[in-house]
Image (cartoon, rainbow, N blue to C red):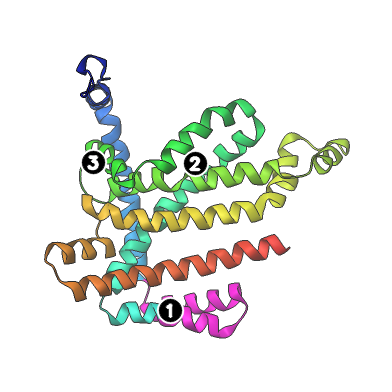
Amino acid sequence: MIEFPTDLQIPLAKWVDQLMDWMLAHFGGVFDVFGKVMLFVLVHIDRFFLWIPWPVVVLCVGALGWKALGKWWHGLILASLLLVIGNFGYWQLAMMTLSIVTASVVISLVIGVPMGILMAWSDWVESLLRPLLDAMQTMPSFVYLIPALMFFGLGKVPAVFATIIYAMPPVIRLTDVGIRQVPKSVVEAAEAFGSSPRQILFNVQLPLARPSIMVGINQTTMMALSMVVVASMIGARGLGLEVLLSINRIQVGRGFEAGLSIVFLAIIIDRITHAMATKNRIK
């Protein structure tokens, strides 16, 4: 009675392995095509970020921080944080990290916002997606690296794939919540004036749900940044890889600088996107 009987064990790991083998055998070509398209897009985004002169990026971040936060010295602090990253010698790696975060967030929004709208429209879809989103948010982030690695190998593409799965749930949930919180009286008034479902969605529900959606974008962006660091384990170049190399070589100072650069990037992204969400809520 001390040891659990082996006859009652569920061979879930074996089933998952068989499913992965079946998918690779039957859809391997699809994954190859998807991977090549994704890599093409990522390479161009990467080149774009590396092409922009660093003073332009610093000035843009400062101006954006000033406009979003409302005070010039806030913009100055954010621009200074970016300068510190450059002074550490991690400018290129920071831009590479930003390019992966940008691609992941854009794809997450393209998929996530329509899914959130579907959840808000249909209780059946919500009951179907809610446990799936719960599982996506509670699953350890390292687990996502396994299927990404099997489907796409090493590099940026599996990193983006894993990041999308990990970062997408907040924007889906908050789009759903934002649309559901739109007062029914407002929707009924729009219907009474003869608005079509499409007009109600784009002219009434989405504008009123924008503060909630912006919070979702903020959360998705922050989770994408944290996952990109983890994704360095499967070959995604960037600040995360620098931290990983520092750990392997026990170079504390190098790891501290790379880690601090990630923190500064997170602060810059969070302050700007959070300020935008707050402004929309106040309006």
Apparent side of residue 6 relative to residue 281 in the rendered image (left or right): left
Q: Is 69 inside the magenta-drawn segment?
A: yes
Q: Amino acid at mark 1?
A: Val
Give the residue at mark 2: 111
Is 187 positioned to the left or the right of 214 in the image?
Answer: right
Q: From what the image shows, is residue 269 above or below residue 36?
A: below
Instruction: Write down the residue under mark 1.
Output: 58
Identity, as a three-letter code, of the amino acid under mark 3: Leu
Image quadrant of residue 102? bottom left
Q: Residues within 10 Å of mark 1 (few under 14, many from 20)?
A: many
Residue bearing the label numbered 3: 149
| For the residues bearing labels 3 and 1, Cβ distance under 8 angstroms | no
Q: What residue is at 27 percent from the left and 75 percent from the top?
A: 257
Task: Establish if 254 lies above or below 146.
Answer: below
Circle 1 — which element?
Answer: helix
Residue 135 in the magenta stretch? The answer is no
Between marks 3 and 1, how big is the CA–CA gap? 35 Å
Most extreme residue toward the front is 1
Instruction: In the rendered view, tell whether residue 137 sits above or below residue 232.
Output: above
Residue at the outermost left position: 249
- CA separation, marks 3 and 2? 22 Å
Q: CA distance from mark 2 to mark 1?
A: 31 Å
User: Which residues lie in the magenta part?
Assistant: 52-80
Expressed as whole percent of the image width and height from the top left, the position of residue 17 reads 22, 26
